Image (cartoon, grey):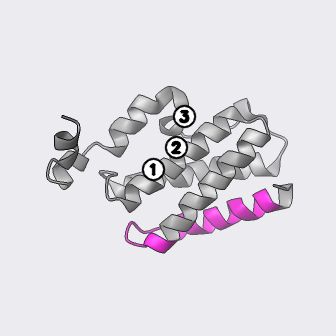
Amino acid sequence: MSTSDVTALVEQLSESAVLADPTDLPLLADMHTGFESLAAWAAEAGRPRGEACARAAAGLVEAVILDEAGDARAALEVVGRAVSAFQLAAAGGHGDDEIEYPAALLTEAAPAASAFIFSRSTTTSGGMLARLSR
């Protein structure tokens, strides 16, 4: 993916993050695909933290789509912060370790992110996850 492609993708994600609503499934699906593309770019560019963040953001968007995010609006705010971090990454001149990706989306914080994503899903889905985990 070229630098101009990454810049255009991040700009598209930025616009989508501003407009994102938990009920706008086509927009959320496009965001999910965009974050998957960013993860692939970050992997190719040697940005492991960026890759982890993009993959986690895609997962968080998926959780919103599936109505498993607990607080969908708060989840989308975290996704918006990820987009802001990728604006710096796409601009260049910043190493992967210099960019402040949302801590909840980094690999080191995976348990915290999982807890956030599924915080209230057992209550909102009638305990389905609890039944499935047995």
Name the disc covering residue 60, or none.
1
Q: Judge whether residue 15 is colored magenta.
A: yes
Identify the residue position indicated by label 3 in the image. 106
Q: Majority secondary structure of the magenta segment?
A: helix
Quarter where residue 24 is shown: bottom left
Side (left or right) of 128 relative to 20: left
Q: What stretch is highlighted in magenta?
A: 5-26
Side (left or right) of 85 relative to 134: right
Say which element carries label 3: loop
Say which element carries label 1: helix
Task: For the N terminus, give its image quadrant.
Answer: bottom right
For image coordinates 15% across by 47% down, the residue present is 127
Whole-Å distance between the Cαs marked 2 and 3?
7 Å
The three-letter amino acid code for the residue at tag 3 is Leu
Whole-Å distance between the Cαs marked 3 and 1?
12 Å
Q: Nearer the viewer, residue 15 or 118?
A: 118
The three-letter amino acid code for the residue at tag 1 is Leu
